[in-house]
Image: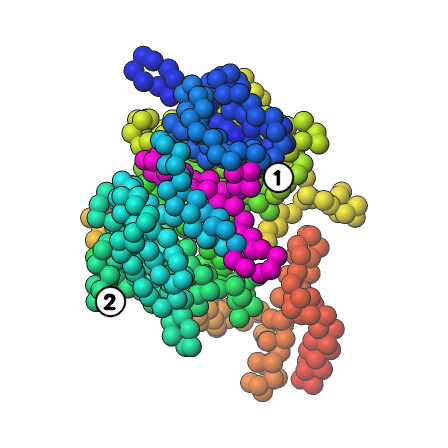
Amino acid sequence: CPLQSCLLFTLKCKQGKRVLRGSEGLYMVNGPPSFTESTSFQRDSGKNCKAVAFSKDGSLFAWCNGEKVNIVDVTNAALLRSFDLPKAVCLEFSPKNNVLATWQAYTTAKDGTAGLPNLQLYDVKTGKCLKSFIQKKLQNWCPCWADDESICARNVNNEVHFFENNNFNTIANKLHLQKVNDFVLSPGAQPTKVAVYVPGSKGAPSFVRLYQYPNFGGPQSALANKSFFKADKVTMLWNKKATAVLVIASTEVDKTGASYYGEQTLHYIATNGESAVVQLPKNGPIYDVVWNPNSVEFCAVYGFMPAKATVFNLKCDPVFDFGTGPRNAAYYSPHGHILVLAGFGNLRGQMEVWDVKNYKLISKPVASDSTYFAWCPDGEHIVTATCAPRLRVSNGYKIWHYTGSLLHSYEVPSKEEMWQVSWQPFLDGVFPAKAVKYQAVPSELPSAEPKPAQAYRPPALRDKPVTSSKLHEDEPPQNMKPQLGSGDKPLSKTALKNQRKHEAKKAAKQEAKADANQECTQSSASQNAPRSAVPAVTSGDPEVDKKIKNLKKKLKAIEQLKEQAAAGKQLEKNQLEKIQKETALLQELEDLELGL
C-alpha cells in the first residue's frame, strides 16, 4: 500500500497517505505524524491484489483486485473508473493523468494462432480504450511519455515508434536502428531527447546514441555517440535537466573470474557531444549509480566489499569519497540536499545519512532485513520495509526521520505477508526544502540500534587478551575537491597510481640511504671504540662473514615472528614457513663459525 506524508500549506495541514498491499488486503495509512489507517479509502480485503499505481501528482490511485481495475480520487476516495480486467498485473498512469496503461500476460490459442492484444491504453476521463497492442514481454512493457504528453514512444521490432498528443492510431515518427534493444526519453520540458542502445554483434561494439526528437536522420544527426565493448545489457540514466546520460554497461559473466556479478563499466554521455569513461578507483561490481536532483553531480557505489562510494561532477572528477563500508545502494533526497548510503539485501541494513552541502555525517540508523527503501516527497522522512517474496518472515515497515529517529513501526501478524509499500507522490515544489538538522528529532519509540554482536572466541583463547584483527582496513572519507587557491585538479586513476609508485620509490631510496648512514656510523663507532673492547670475530674471508651476517639477520627476524605469535597475532603462511627453517639456519651458522 502507498504511504502518504504530512503536507504543510501555510497554516493548513493536509495529511498524505501511503499504500500497503499484502495478504491482509489493500489499504492506505496516513503519514507523519498520525500513522493511522485512512478512513476515506475503504480497505479492499481481497487477497488477490496484483498491481497498484499512483498518478505522478498523487491525485489518482489505481489498483487491480483480481476482478476489476479501479481508479479513485485520492482526496475523497470517490470511484472514477472501473474496468473489467481481472488478469491485469501492471498499471501505469501517463504523466498528466490522461491515460492509464494496463498489461496482462500474453497468451496464444491452443491451436497456436496469435493471441489477443494484452496492452491496453484507456482514456481516464471517458473510460474509452484508446488503443490495444500486443506486448509479449513484461520487460519495458509500458509506453514512455514526455512529461507534457506531447510524445509517446514504444519499442516495436527493433524500431522506436513515436505517437503525438496521445493519438495512437497514427505513427508520427520512427527511429530505426539495427537491433535497437532499449531506449529512454529525457525528462523535463521540450525539446525531448532520446537515448537508444544497440548491442554489438560480430565483433562490432555496442553503442548508445542521443537524439533530439524528431531529428533521426542517421548517425550524423545524433547529439552524441558512445561505443564500447563488454556489454550484454545497459542501464541508461538521464539527469533531471536532460543534459547528460549515465550508462552502466554490464556483462553476465566476468571472463577473468574476478567477480561473480559479471563485469560493469560506467560511461558518461552529454548532449553537447562530450563522453567519457568514469574511472572508479576500486575494482569490483558497480552496485548503484544515482544522479543528484540538481543534475550537476552523481554518486556511484562500487568495488568489492567493503564497497566505496564516491560523488563525481560533470567532468567525471571525484568530488567527495565516502571511504569504504558495508553498502550497496545510494538514495538522494527529493531536494538533493541529503544522501543516504545503505547496505540492504544480503547486508545488515546499515544506513549512513550525509549532508550533501557540507559532506557531514548526520546519522547512522540500522534497518535490519530491509528489502525496500524510499524517501518521502517532503525530503524529511524515510520508509524501510521487509516485503515478500524477498523475505516471507518479519514483514512490516518502519518510518524514520533522516536524523536517525524511528517514528513508527508496524509488523504484520504472523502467517501474513506484505507485498508492497509506497509513498503517495507529489509534484516538485509542493514541499519546500528545509535546513538540514543534525539533532535527532524526538520520538516515542525506543532507539532501534541493535546490540553489537560479540565475535565468537574458541575456549582456548577466552582467557587471553583480545587482539583486534580485520580482513580489510576501512578507508576514511576524504574531500577530493582541490583546495581554494591551489589550482590543482583531482588526479586521474592512472596519475594516482603513478604518484603512489613514485612515493614508494622515494621512500625506498630514503630507507636505503638511512641504512647506509647507519652502517657508516657503526663502522666509525667501531673504529673509535676503546682498545680494551672485544674485537669482532672475523674469518678473514669476506664472503663467509657476509653469510654469517645474513644468517644472524634471518634468525633475528624469526625471533620477532615467534614473539608476535606468542602475543596472539595470526601469522601468514610464509611467516610460519620461516619459523620452520630456524633449526636449519642455526646448524648452518654453527658450521660456518666452527670453520673459522
- Tag 1: amino acid: Ala
Q: Position of residue 225 (x, y in %)?
A: 28, 64
> Which of 160/565 is in front?
160
- The answer to whether residue 306 is above or below residue 175 is above
Mark 1 vs 2: CB contact within 8 A: no
| Badge nearest the viewer, 1 or 2 | 2
What residue sits 55% from the left and 38% below the top? 86
Whether residue 187 appears in magenta in the rendering, the answer is no
At label 1, counting other C-alpha atoms closer than 10 Å, the crowd grade (few under 14, some 14-19, many 20 or more) is: some
Q: Secondary structure at mark 1?
A: loop
Q: Position of residue 412 (x, y in %)?
A: 64, 28
Write the start and end of the magenta stretch as one range. 85-114
* 576 lies left or right of 106: right
Q: Main secondary structure of the magenta part?
A: loop
- Tag 2: amino acid: Gly
> Which of 476/400 is in front?
400
- The answer to whether residue 49 is above or below residue 590 is above
* 8 lies left or right of 447: left
- The answer to whether residue 253 is above or below residue 413 is below
Check residue 218 in the rendering and tell me which mark sits there, or answer none: 2
- The answer to whether residue 135 is above or below residue 553 is above
Check residue 388 in the rendering and tell me which mark sits there, or answer none: 1
From the image, which quarter does the C terminus lie in? bottom right
Q: Position of residue 556 (x, y in %)?
A: 63, 66
Specify which label sits upstream in the sequence, 1 or 2: 2
- Please, which colouring scheme is shown? rainbow
What residue sits 61% from the left and 35% below the top? 48
What residue sits 61% from the left and 39% below the top? 388
